[in-house]
Amino acid sequence: MSRWLVPTLYIVFLLLPIYWLLNMSFKTTNEILGTFALIPLEFTLDNYIKIFTDPAWYRGYINSILYVVINTVISVSFALPAAYAFSRYRFLGDKHLFFWLLTNRMAPPAVFALPFFQLYAAIDLFDTHIAVALAHCLFNIPLAVWILEGFMSGVPKQLDEMAYIDGYSFPRFFVKIFMPAVASGIGVAAFFCFMYSWVEMLLSKTLTSVAAKSIAATMTRTASTAGYELGLLAAAGALTIIPGAIVIYFVRNYIARGFSLGRV
């Protein structure tokens, strides 16, 4: 009995916050504050209707998806050759440089918020999607390099030598042979870049105002003099789970291999 009881309880424990978020999203703020019920007593779709009909809300999701996708593409594209260099070559200061890359991941975003704000304001990049995407590269490229280097180091160097003997140029070898060999690592790196960029709030809120305002920043609009619109906030939070779930679905096989083979 314990073979299925313990996993079941664990899964219920993990899903309970998500269920409660969905439960709140179909309630009014008055019901959330006034009663404690496992199901909505007065079921309402008004919270979701407002999100899908108010441009300020649904554009927040579009803006977030745009800069997150841009960041993921840039981060993985730059991390691939960098990780290959760290895995295949030895050069002066390589270990120190590799460690320095990781320290960028350790730094809190608040440290870089003001420098990025002043820089982007000076070069007219403030309130653009590319501004947030480039800011997130500071954290995601080191993470992607660290993950991919672990995968690439597991690929024998003989693969490179055999490709050169067969007449492959380096770009052709890298795209046609090497990248498929580390496809699991690319999937894992892309997943973590997407998720870190998707949930990051401070930089995305600081570097945008209207045109590229993220959903995380838009969700702060639920505060007013009367309090928080908890039902609307819950509905917005529930919808933010969907992009991450979609990404996990498409890279689920790569993630499984990544946890067993790579630096995850």
Image (tube, grey):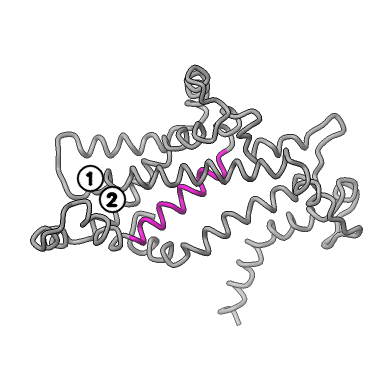
Q: Position of residue 89 (x, y in %)?
A: 16, 46
Quarter that holds the C terminus: bottom left
Magenta span: helix, strand or loop, mainly? helix
Quarter that holds the N terminus: bottom right
Does 129 sit above or below residue 28?
above
Q: Is 76 placed left or right of 152 in the picture?
A: right
Residue appearing at x 45%, y 34% in the figure: 134
Task: Say few, some or many: other residues with alpha carbon within 10 Å of mark 1 (under 14 / 14 to 19 / 20 or more).
Answer: many
For label 1, the SS is helix
Does 47 sit above or below residue 15?
above
Name the residue type under label 2. Answer: Glu
Q: Position of residue 190 (x, y in %)?
A: 43, 52
Q: Position of residue 210 (x, y in %)?
A: 66, 30
Sequence-wise, the earlier of marks 2 and 1 is 1
* Extreme residue in the left direction: 165
Name the residue type under label 1. Answer: Phe
The residue beneath circle 1 is 86
Judging depth in this view, the residue of 220 and 210 nearest the camera is: 210
Residue 149: assigned label:
2
Q: Is 73 placed left or right of 246 in the picture?
A: left
Residue appearing at x 84%, y 35% in the figure: 227
Residue appearing at x 55%, y 40% in the figure: 200
Q: Position of residue 205 (x, y in %)?
A: 61, 31
Residue appearing at x 78%, y 46% in the figure: 53
Q: Which residues are magenta?
A: 183-200
Residue 176 within the magenta-colored segment of the rendering: no
For label 2, the SS is helix
Task: Say few, some or many: other residues with alpha carbon within 10 Å of mark 2 (under 14 / 14 to 19 / 20 or more).
Answer: many
* Extreme residue in the bottom direction: 1
Does 205 sit above or below residue 124?
below
Q: CA distance from mark 2 to mark 1?
A: 7 Å
Q: Tell me, yes or no, whether the two marked residues, 2 and 1, touch with CB atoms within 8 Å.
A: yes
